Image (tube, grey):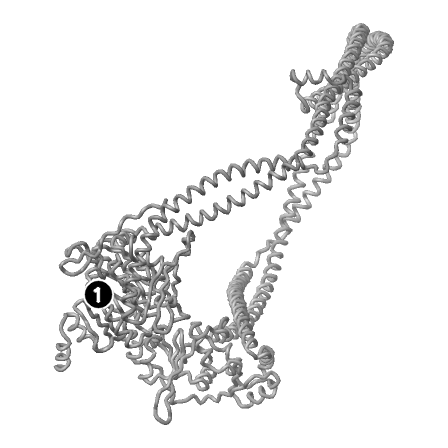
């Protein structure tokens, strides 16, 4: 059951001011659509809003709708709220003041809007949410989205297009009991649900019967399938016992393997005991042998030490014998030397006398110090000059390196800029100059054949800092100029024309006669205020010849550049004699007629530059080229200076070398003289010391005596060493005898050990065989154990032994062979039962489950269907009689009003039994006596006839409405004067009724001599440049005569 809506409050309680609650008592709008500001106070009954087309009548309708929480879509104009702000403004507001339940109670609803589609709501000056404002509007039953209450101009056609179903919905919302639309919607939903339930019950019933008949046909086959499944189930149980029988077999094999392992272990223990008994004597003998071997090694060590000591004593004795022989030889030598010493003494004395005489006869040498000092001074001066030249050369080299670095940087920068020139040349090629790059390269190769500087193409010679200006200049200058080459000599021009003709590039010759009458650049303050800040010939740099050609060919000195502000005020520019103007968006041109002096203008859009996207600074290129030449010249001069300094330095170094050589010769002469004297003095001194040494040599007899004593001492030592050698030989014989005895005993023990070990190895071989057999038994036992575990796991995975399972296993055969035969018999019996459909049981069970589910759902749907029918009858009993009475009242009023306007008309309810979504209101009219009543539509009535019918239907709702006001925009358009006059009388009469709501009728005109009553209020919409003073008089409530008087005084 739908929720019952609260009853609407009665709104036709008129107060002393003749207003009812919810009436609009004041409208104020600011910066809204066509209005700067408007404040008006409509009357409580019929308000005629009159004004010419375009004056802002529909703007007032939009303000009412949007100010009362309506969405922009209901107006049929813009889809966003920001579109209703007056053009050129950032924000605006709408203020609607509604009458409350008393004269003092007013609701001032304000909606602030901006161009960013944002809204802010205020109620009596306090900020509120949209929901709170909507609740106030809903309290007065104001529905701006209901076409029967609110019919804007752009939706009049929509109302005429309403079908009967939509017309019923709009009528239910606008008049009658507020529960009617709720009940109607609930009936529509219930009827749809009823249809769905009826369809579901029918379909489910049919499906249930089909499923039951299908299952009945399958029952015999299902029984045979059950019998086959029992046999297969028995087979499965037998198959479960089969792994347990295999487990028992594995268990027997495992116990047998355990017995074999135990026997092998016993045999291995016996062999181990025998080995232990045999190995003990061998170990005892080995210990004795080890002790004997130790004694042998000890004696052997003593023998080695004795031999070593004997060798040392023998070496000492031999050494002493050699010394004794040496003493005897030395004594013999002394006897022979004494004879020659006397002769040598006499010879040394004679040599000393000869050397002293030579030293005495040697003259004294004086070195030439003055010549040496003179040469040293000259050498220092030359070296100082040479060092200064070396410093100068180093500074010169550093400067050359710096200049070369700067030259390389300059060349890199120039190369980079020339790369940009390549991009510019490519841009020219893209615009149609296919061979411009070849022409440029040809010019670079033949520049040495030209008399004067040649520029080109012009595009690469022009430098523009601001790309925005580049777009202006590119559009202003003809395209052929950008690919032109500029010469400054007639011969150069002819030379280029002959050679560049095949490249299809223009050649322009500049003679250097720049115009003296060229306009100087200056902009007046008035023009600057309009945003004009420069001229097109001032926005770029280029060589003088290139710039002069551009100015003379394209008239750049007559074209000015402005800003966005200039764009807005472009119509004022021509007053200052400017006939060509560039702004960021447009290019303006003004031309003056030669005949009447009339000025005509043209505007073109500015597009982005395509040629100057990679432009380079031509001034920079020229400066870099000049800098390159300057650096190359400087480097050449510095290298010449380097050569001069190097030659001068080498000359000074040669002079210094000559002086060094001369001084070297003098010094060498001095050194030779000094060396000669030192040599003679040294020879005298040596001969004197030799003579003294020979004199000091000892006496012969004393020396021989010393040698004899020394030889006697050495012989005594040799005797003692001989005695020691004898003793060592006796000890060596004793040690060798002891070693021989011990070694023989060790050999005997080794023989006994070998005999015992041979017997032991035979028993060890038997023990190894027993051990290998034991390992084999262990592996076999472990293998049987793993098989047993696997068999157990396999059996447990298939069937776990419980009491019931064990009992079933007892009833089955006890051996594997018998069990496998029984399984084969049961499988054959099961296969003998034929079943064509393998999935028959699954289909039967699945269908049986579906039957149960459908039966349950069918029962629930039948209960729900009965409940839905009951709810529909209840709702229909409340809704349909009320709706019939409402339509009857509307029909009565509509028929009476229509008889006064035309021939006949009626309003009827189009009923469709239980299809509540097809219920509608039919408006039938007849405008001719001979015709029949026809349903209102575009196929049967004209536009004026539909307008009359529509407005009369709205008038017929006046007495039944619960809304505080109604808005109709230009409904009288298309009516003939007779129908329009009759319609107006109907509206005036309806407005005079006490229960009639406030009404706004918008129209661009009114017929003359209409009858007005006190219930009518006329709101004139006036606009225009001369309306300010009259509007003040009208806004103060004065009469038209006052306005006329004011006009007369003026």
Instruction: Evaluate whether residue 559 shows in this view.
Output: no
Residue 128 is situated, as x and y percent measured from the top left of the image, at 26, 52
Q: Classify residue 58 as left or right of residue 277.
A: left
Residue 727 is situated, as x and y percent measured from the top left of the image, at 79, 10
Label 1 neighbourhood size at 10 Å, few (<14), some (14-19), many (20+)? many
Residue 870 is situated, as x and y percent measured from the top left of the image, at 40, 43
Q: Quadrant of the C terminus?
A: bottom left
Residue 411 is situated, as x and y percent measured from the top left of the image, at 54, 70
Closer to us: 722 or 1020 = 1020
Q: How many marks?
A: 1
> Vertical placement of 612 versus 839: above or below?
below
Q: Residue farthest to the bottom?
A: 595
Closer to us: 12 or 655 = 12
> Vertical placement of 1019 versus 100: above or below?
below
Closer to us: 522 or 199 = 199
Q: Quadrant of the N terminus?
A: top left
**Which quadrant of the structure image shows residue 267?**
top right
| Residue at (53, 37) in percent of width and height | 855
* Residue wearing tag 1: 991
Q: Secondary structure at mark 1?
A: helix
């Amino acid at each position: 059951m739908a929720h019952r809506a609260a009853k609407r409050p009665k709104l036709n309680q008129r107060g002393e001011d003749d207003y009812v609650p919810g009436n609009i008592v004041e409208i104020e709008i600011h910066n809204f659509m066509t209005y700067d500001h408007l404040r008006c106070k409509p009357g409580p009954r019929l308000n005629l809003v009159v004004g010419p087309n375009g004056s802002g009548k529909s703007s007032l309708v939009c303000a009412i709708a949007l100010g009362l929480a309506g969405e922009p879509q209901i107006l049929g104009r813009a889809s966003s709220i920001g579109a209703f702000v007056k053009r050129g403004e950032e924000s605006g507001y709408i203020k609607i003041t509604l009458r409350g339940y008393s004269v003092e109670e007013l609701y001032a609803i304000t909606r602030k809007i901006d161009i960013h589609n944002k809204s802010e709501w205020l109620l009596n000056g306090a900020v509120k949410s949209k929901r709170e404002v909507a609740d106030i509007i809903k309290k007065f039953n104001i529905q701006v989205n209901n076409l029967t209450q609110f019919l804007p101009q752009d939706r009049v056609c929509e109302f005429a297009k309403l079908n009967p179903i939509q017309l019923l919905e709009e009528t239910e919302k606008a008049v009658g009991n507020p529960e009617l639309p709720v009940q109607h919607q609930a009936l529509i939903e219930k009827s749809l649900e009823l249809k769905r339930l009826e369809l579901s019950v029918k379909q489910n019933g049919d499906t249930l019967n089909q499923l039951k008949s299908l299952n009945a046909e399958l029952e015999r086959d299902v029984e045979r399938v059950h019998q086959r499944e029992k046999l297969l189930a028995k087979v499965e149980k037998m198959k479960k016992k089969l792994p347990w029988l295999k487990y028992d077999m594995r268990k027997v094999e495992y116990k047998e393997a355990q017995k074999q392992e135990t026997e092998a272990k016993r045999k291995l223990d016996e062999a181990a005991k025998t080995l232990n008994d045999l190995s003990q004597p061998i170990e005892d003998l080995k210990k004795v042998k080890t002790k004997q071997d130790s004694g042998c090694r000890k004696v052997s060590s003593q023998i080695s030490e004795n031999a070593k000591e004997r060798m040392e004593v023998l070496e000492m004795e031999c050494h002493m014998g050699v010394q004794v022989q040496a003493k005897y030889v030395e004594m013999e030598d002394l006897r022979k030397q004494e004879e020659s010493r006397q002769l040598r003494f006499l010879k040394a004395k004679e040599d000393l006398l000869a050397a002293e005489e030579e030293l005495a006869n040697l003259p004294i040498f004086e070195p030439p110090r003055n010549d040496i000092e003179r040469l040293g001074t000259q050498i220092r001066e030359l070296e100082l000059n040479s060092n200064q030249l070396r410093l100068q050369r180093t500074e010169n080299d550093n400067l050359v390196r710096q200049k070369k670095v700067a030259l390389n940087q300059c060349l890199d920068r120039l190369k980079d800029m020339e790369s940009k020139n390549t991009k510019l040349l490519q841009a020219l090629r893209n615009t149609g100059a296919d061979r411009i790059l070849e022409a440029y390269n040809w010019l670079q190769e033949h520049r040495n054949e030209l008399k004067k500087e040649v520029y080109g193409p012009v595009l690469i010679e022009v430098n523009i800092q601001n790309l925005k200006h580049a777009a202006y200049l590119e559009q202003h200058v003809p395209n052929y100029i950008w690919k032109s080459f500029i010469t400054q000599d007639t011969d150069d021009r002819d030379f280029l024309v002959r050679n560049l003709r095949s490249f299809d590039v223009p050649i322009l010759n500049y003679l250097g006669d720049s115009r003296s009458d060229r306009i100087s650049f200056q902009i007046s303050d008035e023009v600057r205020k309009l945003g004009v800040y420069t001229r097109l010939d001032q926005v770029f740099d280029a060589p003088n010849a290139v710039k002069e050609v551009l100015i003379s060919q394209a008239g750049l000195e007559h074209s000015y550049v402005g800003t966005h502000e200039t764009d807005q005020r472009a119509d004022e520019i021509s007053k200052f004699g400017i006939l060509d103007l560039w702004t960021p968006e447009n290019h303006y041109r003004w031309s003056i007629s030669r005949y009447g002096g009339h000025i005509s203008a043209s505007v073109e859009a500015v597009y982005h530059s395509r040629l100057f996207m990679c432009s380079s600074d031509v001034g920079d290129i020229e400066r870099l080229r000049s800098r390159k030449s300057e650096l190359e010249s400087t480097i050449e001069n510095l290298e010449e200076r380097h050569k001069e300094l190097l030659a001068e330095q080498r000359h000074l170094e040669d002079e210094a070398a000559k002086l060094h050589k001369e001084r070297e010769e003098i010094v060498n002469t001095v050194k030779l003289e000094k060396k000669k004297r030192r040599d003679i003095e040294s020879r005298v001194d040596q001969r004197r010391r030799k003579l003294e040494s020979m004199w000091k040599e000892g006496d012969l007899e004393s020396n021989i005596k010393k040698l004899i004593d020394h030889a006697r001492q050495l012989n005594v030592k040799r005797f003692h060493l001989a005695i020691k050698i004898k003793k060592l030989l006796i000890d060596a014989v004793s040690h060798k005898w002891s070693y021989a005895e011990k070694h023989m005993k060790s050999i005997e023990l080794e023989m006994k050990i070998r005999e015992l070990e041979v017997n032991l190895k035979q028993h060890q071989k038997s023990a190894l065989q027993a051990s290998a057999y034991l390992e084999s038994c262990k592996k076999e036992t472990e293998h049987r154990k793993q098989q047993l575990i696997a068999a157990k796991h396999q059996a447990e995975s298939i069937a776990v032994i419980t009491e019931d399972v064990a009992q079933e296993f007892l009833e089955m055969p006890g051996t594997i062979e018998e069990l496998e035969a029984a399984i084969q018999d049961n499988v054959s019996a099961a296969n003998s039962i034929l079943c064509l459909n393998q999935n028959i049981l699954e289909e039967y069970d699945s269908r049986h489950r579906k039957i149960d589910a459908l039966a349950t759902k069918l029962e629930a749907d039948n209960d729900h269907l009965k409940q839905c029918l009951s709810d529909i009858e209840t709702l229909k009993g409340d809704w349909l009689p009320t709706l019939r009475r409402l339509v009857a009242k509307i029909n009565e009023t509509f028929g009476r009003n229509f008889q006064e306007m035309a021939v006949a008309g009626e309003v009827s309810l189009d009923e469709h039994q239980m299809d509540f979504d097809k219920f509608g209101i039919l408006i039938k009219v007849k405008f001719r006596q001979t015709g029949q009543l026809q349903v209102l539509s575009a196929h049967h009535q004209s536009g004026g006839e539909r307008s009359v019918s529509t407005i009369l239907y709205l008038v017929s709702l006046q007495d039944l409405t619960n809304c505080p006001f109604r808005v109709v925009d230009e409904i009288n358009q298309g009516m003939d004067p007779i129908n329009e006059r009759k319609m107006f009388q109907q509206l005036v009469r309806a407005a005079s009724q006490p229960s009639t709501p406030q009404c706004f009728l918008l129209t661009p005109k009114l017929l003359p001599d209409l009858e007005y009553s006190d219930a009518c209020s006329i709101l004139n919409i006036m606009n225009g440049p001369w309306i300010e003073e009259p509007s003040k008089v009208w806004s103060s409530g004065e009469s038209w005569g006052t306005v006329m008087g004011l006009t007369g005084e003026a």
